[in-house]
Structure formats: structure tokens, C-alpha cells
Image (tube, rainbow, N blue to C red):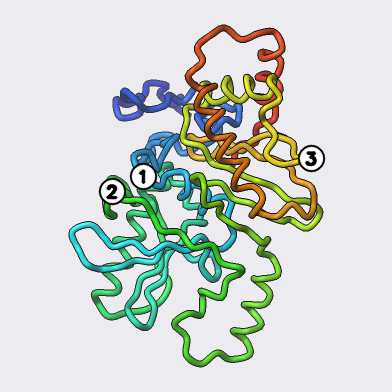
Amino acid sequence: MAKKSRTKTPSAAPQEGEVGPRQPCPCGSGKRYKACHGASWGATTPYVARPFEGMPSECDVIAMRELVPAATAPVTLADSDRVVRLCSLLPMAAPAMVRDSGEIWLGLQVQHNYGDPARDLGAVLEAALAQADEGRSGIVGLQTDPGPGARLQDLIPDESLEITVHDGFGYWLDDVAERDAAMEAALEQANGAANPTVRLEGVTAAYWTNVGTKEHLRWVMPHEEERLLTALARLHAAGKDSIAEGSRLVGMFRAHGRLAPVWDLPIGTGAEVLEGPVTQFAADLEQALEDSSDLTSEQRSARAGLANRQVTIR
């Protein structure tokens, strides 16, 4: 049997701004790209570490996609008066649905694994629009890599989203006039898995949630990772990283190129009492972000501890 050629075609070489197969995967897994998100190296769509970059509501979109169980946001399409409903999660985790009314719902909590979630969402939205124009209702999804094309931020206006966080998934049946027992049972089961969640009003993309055994504040922040870690370390060393009495900054999620610090809160804290403290924390954080002085040994230790308590959501 002849030996396989080890010479790569020009198309296999990483282009400027892309990730090479032997480089660390940008998702933060610690694996080489070719053994992680680049397992299908040479696919049409390269891995995009920060897919929602440029969206005014980037951090809230990340939260809706990864952290918030039940939330919606209406969005009028660019160059059109058509309104699409962005949803954190749709029934059966559908990528999109064309409802009987012709309305389009787009689900954010779906994993296509084609390298660029914003491109995948754009492709699903375009497919749903085409299906709606044909007068067909039902679920819309992707079966293969859609290849180059419009991304989500190309199809919607450059405006902030008006997000509504729901107590459960009742919005799944908002346009259903007559509900049968099967619908109600499915809804009740889904609601049982949804942790109570509140979006705070005083800052952007900060969400309180009650997971039963404890409460959390999870806050997706827009700052560059290394700079944010340094600023958080300064606040920790100064004793300014508490959000409420008994709260503790326990770590952070890394998702789609942004960090989401997580605080543990004592049971019974609730969301309302956090409004003042998070506003003060945001002001303190901005000052820490502007501080360019060298870190002290205590601050360096705090930074290392924070860096070791990151969980990457892929």
C-alpha cells in the first residue's frame, strides 16, 4: 500500500487571524486545535473564538445562550419590518421554529459545532425566513456546515436587545389558543428544570439565580480577559470583590471570548438587594481597569487563584 502524502494542500494552511492545527485551541480546553474544535480541520468555517463580537448586546446574548434558562428578546430584522423572537431555549432544543402564524422564533441554546455560532444562527435564521415565505411551519435546523454566509449580527440591527427573563417556559405556548394535556405536561416538566433567574437592572448582563442549594450572581463582562483578571485581582486584594453580605467570588465561566465571574450568595439574598452593590462594584472595577501599576505579591496571588478557577463553556 502506498504511503499517504504528508504534504498539505494550500487550503489546509491557517490564514491570518485563524488558528493553526497545532496551536492551543482558543476555547481554553488546553488541547491542540486539531484535537479539539479543529478536529474537522479543513472544514468550511474556521473556529471563531468570539463569535458575537460587535453586537451591542454581546454579553447578554452569551448569557442567554449559556447561562439563562428562559428569556426572550424581540428583534426587527435589518432592512425589514419583520420581527423575529430570540429565545434562550425552544421546545426540543430546536434551532428555530416557524410558527403557524408565520412568526419566526430563533433558539440560542443549540450546539451546531460548525466553528462559528453566529454564522450557524445566521444560516438557521435565513432558512427559517425562506421556509416562512413558502408558507410552511415547523422546526428549522442545520444538517451540515453552512459554509460562508451572513452571521447573526449581519441580519439584525446594531441595537441593544430588550430582554425579558421568564419564570419558566410558558412563552413556548404564547401563540397557542387551545392547550391540551400533553402540552401542559411537557411545559410543567420543562419548568421543573428551570432555576429562578432575574436580570439586574443597574448593570449589563448580570443575572441572579437560585439553584436550590445556594444562590449565585453570574455576570458576563465585556472586558478583555487578561485585563479583567488583573482588575479583579486588585479588587480582591483590597477586599472590594464582595457583592452582598456573605457573598464570595468563587470563579468564572469563559464563554465565546468573554468572562463571566460567579459569586456564591447566601440563601435568602434575592436579586433586589444586589442592585446597589453591583453598581458600586462596576464603578470600582472601572477604576481597577485603569490602574496600570505593577501588581503586588498579594495581587499576583489573587490573580493566579482566579485564573485557576475558570470553567470554559464550549
Other-residue count near label 3 (Cα within 10 Å), few / some / many at <14 / 14–19 / ≥20:
few
Report the mark closest to the observer, 3 or 1.
3
Residue at 69%, 19% (x, y): give it. Answer: 237
The residue under label 1 is: 56
Q: Is residue 216 above or below residue 74?
A: above
Which quadrant of the figure has residue 240?
top right
The circle on residue 4 is none
Q: Could you tell me which secondary element the residue under label 2 belongs to? A: loop
Q: Which residue is mark 2?
A: 158
The spot of residue 52 in percent (x, y) is 40, 43
Q: Amino acid at mark 1?
A: Pro
- Residue 214 x %, y %: 78, 51
For the point 28% across and 45% down, the residue is 148
Query: Quick one: label 3 or label 1, which is nearer the N terminus?
Result: 1
Viewer-proximal residue among 95 and 295: 295
Looking at the rendered structure, which numbered label has been put on residue 246? 3
Considering only order in the chain, which callout, 3 or 2, is on the residue closer to the N terminus? 2
Q: Residues within 10 Å of mark 2 (few under 14, many from 20)?
A: few
| Whether label 2 touches label 1, CB < 8 Å | yes
Q: CA distance from mark 3 to mark 1?
A: 33 Å
Residue drawn 59% across and 50% down?
207
Amino acid type indicated by mark 3: Gly
Q: Comparing marks 2 and 3, which lies closer to the viewer?
A: 3
- Say which label, 2 or 1, has the lower sequence index: 1
